[in-house]
Amino acid sequence: MSQFIEAVLFAEFDIDKGSVLRQQYPEKVSDDEGLLAELMLPEGTHNHFQDWTIFMLNRPSSEPFQASKAPASKRWPTHAYQYNTELDPPEWMLAAEAEVAATHWVSIDVPALQSGGVAQLPVIQIELGGDKRHRLQHHEELQYVALQPDFASMYSFDGEALGLHFRSGEQQKEFKAALDAAVTAASQPAEASVLWCLSHVSNRRDKTVRRGAQVKALAICSRFQFIHVWKPLLLLAVDRLYSLSTGLGEYSESPREQCRYLFEALNALPVSALPPVSELQRQAHRLMLAQGSATKELSHVGHVQWLNSQIPMRIPLLLQPQELAETSITELLKRFKGGLMAAFHALLNNQRLLFLGHSQPAGGVCTAVLSVPLLVCPPLSNVLPRCFPYTTLNNLDFLNVKGYVAGSTNPIFESHPEWWDVLMDIDTGKVLVSTTGANGKPCCGEPKKLDEMDAELMEQVSSGMDAHYSEYWL
């Protein structure tokens, strides 16, 4: 990736035509200009001075990514071991919590999405019997080695030695070949690169136009997930739009030139300036932040020239493949408390999850949706492709996506329980679940009371939140 920004979009509200996309620079990123305009100019904009939306273009499949060289889904029978260094001499012991009499199974979870230029490496999943399992993401220091034809060792992120005893040397070789193929497949560029889009819309009073106000929006499209860092420049660029406006749809400088100015200003910041951060470094620093032994996030500060000013840009270096910045589990917990467990289970069970914020800015709804993948640690590999941060009634295609996570500001969605399984009302903190009524038609009701394990988990999380533990701990 040679540049941070792939395109700049400009849209505005026309009293006769509605939401209109005026410009895509330097070239088209979508032929559906009507949809782009609606995503950039959210419903209820007239109630807010400004707002933000986030949306995705070139959306990948929400099914696990399978390249031609990636292995098919398979499990290998094995027994899992840990190297116990506290014994004298050290020796291999059956993995903690593993069921002795049970056959363990090892499989490879192939990532669903390449995003932000970060290759998503496969996850080795070891089922230990019952509901117990161990997940280990492939990393630079894995050091997978066959100590015997049917026995292989590897290292976790924290340096713990793990062993897999296969039933035969052939099965060990087959697993190793599948793991190598998955690593290679995850490192290949996607056929169509995902574009993350951030739109800033501004609503300003103007007595010279029929509607009494002008509504304009600019959006940037990037292959990188840290789109929030461009917010200061989008604010300034929209201000410049208004300053150059000579009437509704008329400008002293063409919209294309204004988009070009923003595009070139942002891309003057070199991508090569970003310091390389390995997956092992990323995971280690996140762990230190969670434990409190580190207090500062890893970031890179660059400067963008805008008119006569140098605008600082702080780019985060710790984002995981299924994570966008400026998301917050803390805010979800404050809003929904124990009701958030309904969203947690919906995410795990591939249920349809809808966030509704009728009186909320669209930006708040987008943030809630994009915070959902962080409810599971490590994040599931196929959640972001099924996230729709902002949706409207004019485009209900997302209803065809299994286990979607979507957000809307339109209250009509609440009256259609057949469209969702769990609804999270951001305005009230209320949680509804879709059920079947006595007449056989869909209706909504309250979620079940938390069971003992869920209640205990919520108590631990609430205690950590009261103690002001970091997002990384949560």
Image: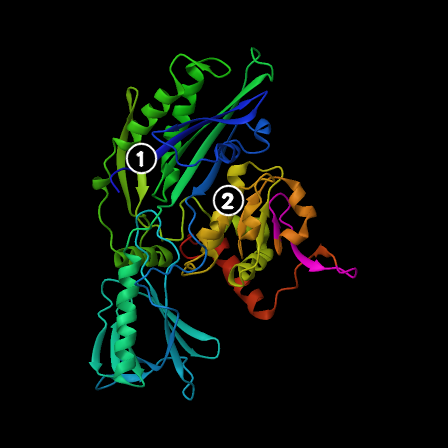
Question: Quarter of the image holding residue 195?
Answer: top left
Q: Are marks 2 and 1 in contact (CB under 8 Å)?
A: no
Residue occupying the point 36% across, 34% down: 230
Residue identifier under label 1: 313
Question: Quarter of the image holding residue 392?
Answer: top right
Q: Relative to residue 121, is residue 240 depicted above or below?
A: above
Of all residues, the one furthest to the right in this rendering is 439
Q: Which residues are magenta?
A: 423-440
> Which of label 2 and label 1 is nearer to you?
2
Q: Quadrant of the N terminus?
A: top left
Q: How many residues crowd mark 2 within 10 Å: few (<14), some (14–19), many (20+)?
A: many
Residue occupying the point 41% across, 14% down: 244
- Looking at the rendered structure, which numbered label has been put on residue 289? none
Identified by mark 2, the residue type is: Pro
Q: What is the secondary structure assignment of the residue under circle 1?
A: strand
Q: How many residues crowd mark 1 within 10 Å: few (<14), some (14–19), many (20+)?
A: many
Residue identifier under label 2: 389
Residue 444's spot in the image, x, y percent? Answer: 70, 55
Q: What whole-number distance in Å separates the C-alpha atoms at marks 2 and 1? A: 24 Å
Q: Quadrant of the C terminus?
A: bottom left
Residue 321's spot in the image, x, y percent? Answer: 36, 53
Residue 257's spot in the image, x, y percent? Answer: 35, 20
Identified by mark 1, the residue type is: Met
Is residue 86 visible in the rendered image? The answer is no
Is residue 103 visible in the rendered image? The answer is yes
48 or 173: nearer the viewer: 173
Task: Inspect the magenta stretch and tell me whether residue 349 lies in it.
Answer: no
Q: Earlier in the sequence, mark 2 or mark 1?
A: 1
